[in-house]
Amino acid sequence: MPDRSSKNDNFFSLLVRSQKIVYAYILSMVHNCSDADDIMQETLTLMWERFDEFKPGTNFGAWGVKIARYKVLAFFKKRKRSEEKFDEALIEQIEDCFSHKSDEVKYRIVALQDCLKKLNERDRKLIEIHYEENTKITELAKRLNRPVPGLYKVMARIHTALRRCVNRTILSWDL
């Protein structure tokens, strides 16, 4: 039986690669960030508690989505308002759509990682600070002593370049 440290390392290594997919699934089902965050927290807790049941070599993200599905269903059962409820068939249709889109998302993530490497160092640093450190543009502008409108324009230019690069990269793969 692996020690607790090894279990932690294995779990978090798999989680880092799959967390966005699980969260995207949850958000696609509930459409509210606050509710999605709560469900994600419950899902992660249950994934950790049941990690011994996960079969190594299988798809950790799919396993997490399966657990999230039950948490989403429990969330809807708790809701009293009818406009927030989904029936089982609709949830299955959304899941089918999500599973088809999740492959596309994976390809886009790989392409984006490649495109980020192609950015010049200054632009890449701006993106890293903004997204990895979760820094607002206004805070970033103050930190860099740059005007806010100008920084918005720079970020828009970088986003456009990344979007074009991702699209070109995916087209070149001949999937």
Image (spheres, rainbow, N blue to C red):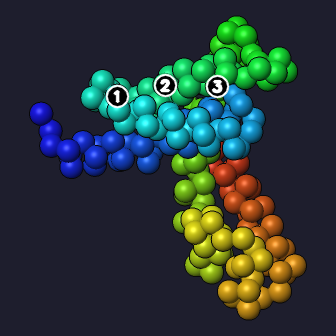
**Identity of the residue drawn at 62% across and 43% down:** 37
Residue pointed to by mark 3: 75
- Horizontal and vertical percent for residue 35? 68, 38
Q: In terms of secondary structure, where does tag 1 sit?
A: loop
Please state which of residues 158 and 42 is positioned toward the viewer in this rendering: 42
How far apart marks 2 and 1 lie (CA) works out to 10 Å
> Does residue 84 appear anywhere in the picture?
yes
Please state which of residues 166 and 149 is positioned toward the viewer in this rendering: 149
Q: Which amino acid does label 3 sit on?
A: Phe
The numbered mark at residue 147 is none
131 is higher (above) or lower (below) than 144: above
Q: Are marks 2 and 1 in contact (CB under 8 Å)?
A: yes
**Identity of the residue drawn at 20% across and 44% down:** 4
Q: In terms of secondary structure, where does tag 2 sit?
A: helix
Residue pointed to by mark 1: 50
54 is higher (above) or lower (below) than 116: above
Residue pointed to by mark 2: 67
User: How packed is label 2: few (under 14 Cα within 10 Å), some, or many (20 or more)?
Assistant: some
Q: Quadrant of the N terminus?
A: top left
Mark before the other along the chain sequence, 3 or 1: 1
Please state which of residues 173 and 77 is positioned toward the viewer in this rendering: 77
> Does residue 173 appear anywhere in the picture?
no
Q: What residue type is labelled 1?
A: Arg
Mark before the other along the chain sequence, 2 or 3: 2
How far apart marks 3 and 1 lie (CA) works out to 20 Å
Mark before the other along the chain sequence, 2 or 1: 1
- Horizontal and vertical percent for residue 90? 73, 13
Q: In terms of secondary structure, where does tag 3 sit?
A: helix
In the picture, measured across the screen, residue 16 lies left or right of residue 24, that is: left
User: How packed is label 1: few (under 14 Cα within 10 Å), some, or many (20 or more)?
Assistant: few
